[in-house]
Image (cartoon, grey):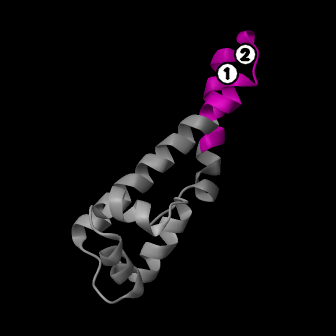
C-alpha cells in the first residue's frame, strides 16, 4: 500500500491521523505521520487492519441500504421487496463500495 492510498482510505473512513494511529495502526501518531508522509513503508499489519475496517464499512453500508429499501415497502410486499432490495443493493455497490 502506498502512502497516498493510506491517506485516502483514512479520509474515506472520516477519521483523523490520531484515531487511525490508535485504532488501525496500533502505533504512535508520529509513526502514523511517517507512514502518511512516505517516510516509512506502511507495515503489512497496518495494511491488513485497514482492509478489514474497509470491508466492515462495506458490509454495514450494504446492510443499511437493504434495511432502508425494505422498510419502504408494505408488509404485503415483504418477500418481493426483499428480493428487489438485494438486487437494488447489488446494483449500488460500485457507487458505494471501495475496492483496493
Residue 78, placed above or below residue 46: above
Residue at which label 2 appears: 77
Q: Which residue is mark 1?
A: 80
Residue 79 against residue 10 in the figure, above or below: above
Looking at the rendering, in which quadrant would you find the N terminus? bottom left
Depth check, front residue: 80 or 63: 63
* Cα distance in 3D space between marks 1 and 2: 5 Å
Q: Position of residue 3 (x, y in %)?
A: 40, 81
Q: Quadrant of residue 95?
A: bottom right
For mark 2, does the 10 Å Cα neighbourhood hold few (<14), some (14 to 19), or many (20 or more) residues?
few
**Is 5 positioned to the left or the right of 39 in the image?**
right
Residue range corresponding to the magenta coloring = 66-89
What residue appears at the point 27 percent right and 61 percent down from the top-left corner? Answer: 26
Q: Position of residue 33 (x, y in %)?
A: 38, 79
* Quarter of the view holding residue 49: bottom left
The structure residue drawn at horizontal position 54% and vertical position 35%, both measured from the top left corner, is 63
The residue drawn where x is 61% and y is 33% is 66
Residue 18: x and y in percent read 42, 65
Please say whether residue 77 is one of the residues in the magenta stretch.
Answer: yes
Amino acid at each position: 500500500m502506498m502512502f497516498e492510498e493510506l491517506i485516502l482510505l483514512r479520509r474515506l473512513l472520516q477519521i483523523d491521523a490520531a484515531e487511525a494511529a490508535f485504532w488501525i495502526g496500533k502505533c504512535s501518531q508520529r509513526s502514523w505521520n511517517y507512514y502518511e508522509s512516505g517516510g516509512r513503508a506502511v507495515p503489512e499489519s497496518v495494511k491488513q487492519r485497514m482492509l478489514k475496517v474497509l470491508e466492515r464499512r462495506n458490509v454495514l453500508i450494504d446492510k443499511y441500504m437493504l434495511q432502508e429499501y425494505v422498510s419502504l415497502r408494505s408488509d404485503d410486499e415483504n418477500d418481493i421487496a426483499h428480493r428487489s432490495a438485494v438486487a437494488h443493493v447489488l446494483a449500488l455497490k460500485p457507487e458505494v463500495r471501495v475496492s483496493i
